[in-house]
Amino acid sequence: MNKAADNNIPTISRVLADGALVEALYDPAEASTALAIRLPTGSISIEPHLDLPDHSRLTPYAAGNNLLSSGCVLLPSDVGAFADKDELVADVRAFIHRYVDLSPLFEEIAAYYVLLSWVHDAFNEMPYLRFQGEYGTGKTRALLAVGSLCYKPFFASGASTVSPIFHVLDAFGGTLVLDEADLRFSDATADLTKILNNGTMKGLPVLRTMTNRHRELNPQAFKVYGPKIVAMRDGFHDEALESRFLTERTGGRPLRSDIAVSIPDVMHAEARALRNRLLAWRFAARHGVAIDPARTVEGLSPRGNQMALPLLSLIDDANLRDRIGRDLVALEARVVTKRAAAPEATMVRVLAKLFGSARVTHLPLSAVTSAYNEEAGGRGDAPLSVKGAGWLVRGKLGLETAKTRGVYVIPQSERGKVSELADRYGIDPMPRSITDEVEALGFAARSAKNMRPAHNLTPVLVS
């Protein structure tokens, strides 16, 4: 047994190669820390340290560590009495109901999300929980109540310095509980978005520029995977990031009269007691949970199912899974409807129509702009300039343009990309017909008038 201080490894949690589970405990009343150890045999003990075969020693973080003593990171104080999953979910939901006003379905989702956070490392993907609404609608209360039950919750704000968030997530893991996640126009917002974008899947660390003590460039990969609970007023512009959230919109109804305006002190003691019981459940369930592909939701996109399956795999109640599935499908349908009205969708619809009907080698950007304005004008949208159309085509849709005969065009080589974009936006390319051919000739003729003559160039019409 090597007791050399250099071999001590401060530890918050660890899954050892033989399947043993190690979790740090912090008792605020005694101001003490220890390690709870669950061996593969099923025996559980609380120890001051754990010696490993390589002569290193796992030790708990010091009780005086500011993250623990300040309550910034919450840990269990003991291993509580084991309860089966249904009983534990019922108690977690009762706790949430006591202190937070949520819709009945989301209250159940939040209760299972708490359990999911305690075994999240058994899964490769992880959705996020979000409370969205204006100030004064209970977002922060929901964060504090639900977050206090999660696995190793780390409380932070969008106004925080981002560097410690990276370091704590990398060293502690656990659940990031983030308030004011949608701060605008700051470098911190960009870094927080990186955490949220990369944190849903294992194996996607965030690289940050670091230097060693010799001032040599030494980039470091920060692990940011894990459950996250966020509160924000608006949404993110990135649809891919938006698809990672299970969202409750707060403030849609009057607050229940039985909910205290101020958080009572007893809530913290109740949350700690539940964390202790949840630790006992983690010790029993961690190696037995896995994705259940049979619980895929029909009608939900592959991305939607990827985010939902970890949660649904923990829910044995088929009726509840069905209600959650219907809610997620309806949400995706609203997103598709909203996307179809966006300028990007209008442009894709125009390009799909032109490429689907006009047998041309390229689409002049000026003609595309005219077709876009004709399409968008019917809805009362402001007309787009050629420069604006170019930004939409290149910047938002990622299509290439080229300069031919002195004007910018979208080459036919982009036709495949347009087809893929049409699928993404739920747009059916227009079928070809005799009318299409006539319109194509007219489109090509109108386009040719706007192009300066040049020698030895491919003609606009394909014979």
Image (cartoon, rainbow, N blue to C red):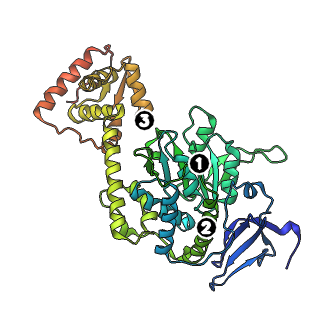
Q: Secondary structure at mark 1?
A: strand
Depth-wise, is mark 2 or mark 3 nearer the camera? 2
Q: Are the two marked residues, 2 and 3, in contact with CB atoms closer than 8 angstroms? A: no
Q: Residue at x 56, y 52 (%)?
A: 143
Q: Local crowd at mark 3 within 10 Å, few (<14), some, or many (≥20)?
A: some
Residue designated by label 1: 178
Outermost residue, front side:
257
Distance from label 3 to label 1 (Cα)?
32 Å
Counting from the top left corner in percent of width and height, residue 21 is at 65, 74
Decide if residue 168 is on the left or right side of residue 117. right
Along the viewing direction, whichever of 269 and 54 lies nearer the viewer: 269
Residue type, label 3: Gly
Q: Which mark is residue 275?
A: 2
Counting from the top left corner in percent of width and height, residue 381 is at 31, 23
On the rendered image, what quadrant is the N terminus found in?
A: bottom right
Mark 2 or mark 3, earlier in chain: 2
Q: Secondary structure at mark 2?
A: helix
Residue type, label 1: Leu
Residue designated by label 3: 398
